Image (cartoon, helix red, strand yellow):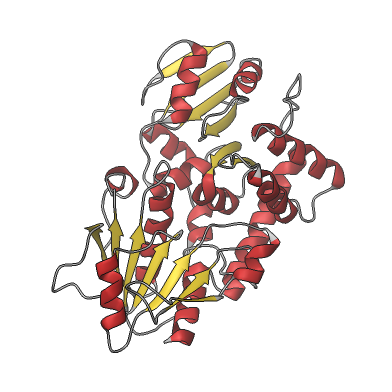
């Protein structure tokens, strides 16, 4: 989709373990790939040192602050997840002869309210932005929403990927007859039960830094640092280094089963076409339960009823919404086929309708 290069200001506050920054960086890169220019304003961009060590041409990273006198708002302003840009910046938006299109990029969900709320206006009646209109833009899984981020050429890159070579680069040697599992999680009370089961059959567990490595190390009785290996029974737990976003994608492509958390890694797990289990950020009011059920309605579409029931149970257990079983069932072969076909179907929909970057461009064009 070719269009004139516009300047996008994307604002991001890092709230939980850099997930918000991860979404904003992927969005910034996608917009640049579509011919746009991006200024990414972040209150803590330190994670980009490992998430995007080489940066990206066309993306300028700026600290969250009031703009300097020569920094006027661009053509489009995107606030990620309702983070509210600095008041002085908003006042500058209102002062422009042609105010920028103001977008509130919301969280991803498959719940019904998303389609109802997507693209609704929010007129600003007070404050520095009085007189402006903010527009809600919701990512989602169907044509009534803003879609999902999906870069061009991703499927071809995945098909040509050499998993053995990439695994060697992070110190992991594939072993025949051994299941390979990735672990990226929040605090996970069910992890002890799963670790016990993985010790009973040949398993290579590839553990990301942060909460996942801390919990695995505590449960196995020794710190699990990047590049280190812990053995317990038939389990080999590999401590991974901090991975760039392309590196994390390759981790997902290299495993038989992926445990992911948050929304950026959920989308990447879908595109990987491999079996996965998603951990949602737990909400004190239990709202994550409804969000999970809505997603399972999307993910399990077309699955055999017995497989759908087994997978729903596994997702509920991993999210603390059902008690872990006394024995883990083997990874069902039909799950592998379903993961491939469901991921491919969702990819085809993004290509036919336009991914989130393209839909966002179209929406902005309609409001300028």
Quadrant of the drawing holding the N terminus: bottom left
Front residue (pair 32, 191): 191
Q: In this view, which residue lies farthest toward the left? A: 69
Q: Is residue 272 visible?
A: yes
Q: Residue at x 21, y 63 (%)?
A: 66
Q: In this view, which residue lies farthest toward the right? A: 305
Q: Residue at x 61, y 36 (%)?
A: 257
Q: Position of residue 325 (x, y in %)?
A: 76, 24
Q: Is residue 71 left or right of residue 270?
A: left
Front residue (pair 165, 24): 24
Q: Is residue 254 above or below residue 209?
A: below
Q: Position of residue 10 (x, y in %)?
A: 35, 65
Q: Is residue 74 visible?
A: no
Q: Residue at x 37, y 35 (%)?
A: 169
Q: Is residue 144 left or right of residue 361?
A: right
Q: Position of residue 11 (x, y in %)?
A: 34, 62
Q: Is residue 319 above or below residue 225?
A: below
């Amino acid at each position: 989709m070719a269009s004139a290069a516009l300047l996008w200001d994307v604002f991001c506050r890092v709230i939980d373990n850099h997930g918000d920054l991860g979404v904003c960086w992927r969005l910034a890169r996608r917009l640049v790939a579509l011919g746009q220019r991006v200024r990414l304003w972040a209150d803590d961009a330190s994670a980009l040192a490992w998430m995007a060590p080489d940066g990206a041409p066309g993306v300028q990273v700026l600290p969250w602050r009031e703009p300097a006198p020569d920094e006027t708002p661009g053509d489009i302003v995107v606030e990620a997840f309702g983070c509210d840009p600095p008041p002085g910046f908003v006042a500058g938006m209102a002062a422009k002869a042609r105010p920028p299109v103001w977008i509130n990029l919301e969280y991803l969900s498959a719940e019904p309210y998303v389609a109802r709320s997507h693209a609704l206006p929010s007129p600003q009646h007070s404050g520095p932005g009085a007189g402006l209109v903010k527009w809600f833009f919701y990512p989602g899984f169907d044509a009534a929403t803003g879609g999902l981020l999906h870069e061009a050429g991703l499927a071809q890159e995945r098909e040509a990927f050499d998993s053995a070579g990439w695994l060697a680069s992070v110190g992991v040697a594939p072993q025949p007859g051994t299941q390979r599992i990735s672990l990226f999680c929040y605090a996970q009370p069910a992890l002890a039960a799963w670790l016990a089961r993985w010790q009973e059959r040949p398993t290579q567990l590839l553990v990301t830094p942060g909460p996942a490595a801390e919990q695995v190390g505590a449960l196995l009785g020794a710190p699990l640092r990047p590049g280190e290996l812990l053995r317990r029974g038939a389990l080999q737990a590999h401590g991974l280094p901090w991975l760039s976003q392309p590196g994390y994608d390759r981790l997902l492509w290299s495993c038989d089963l992926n445990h992911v958390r948050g929304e950026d890694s959920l989308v990447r797990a879908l595109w990987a076409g491999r079996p996965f289990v998603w951990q949602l950020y737990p909400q004190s009011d239990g709202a994550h339960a409804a969000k999970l059920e809505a997603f399972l309605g999307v993910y399990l579409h077309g699955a055999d009823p017995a497989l759908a029931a087994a997978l729903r149970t596994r997702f509920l257990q991993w999210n603390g919404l059902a008690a872990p079983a006394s024995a883990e069932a083997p990874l069902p072969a039909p799950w592998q086929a379903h993961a491939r076909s469901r991921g491919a179907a969702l990819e085809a929909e993004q290509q036919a309708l336009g991914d989130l970057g393209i839909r966002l461009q179209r929406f902005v064009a309609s409001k300028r």
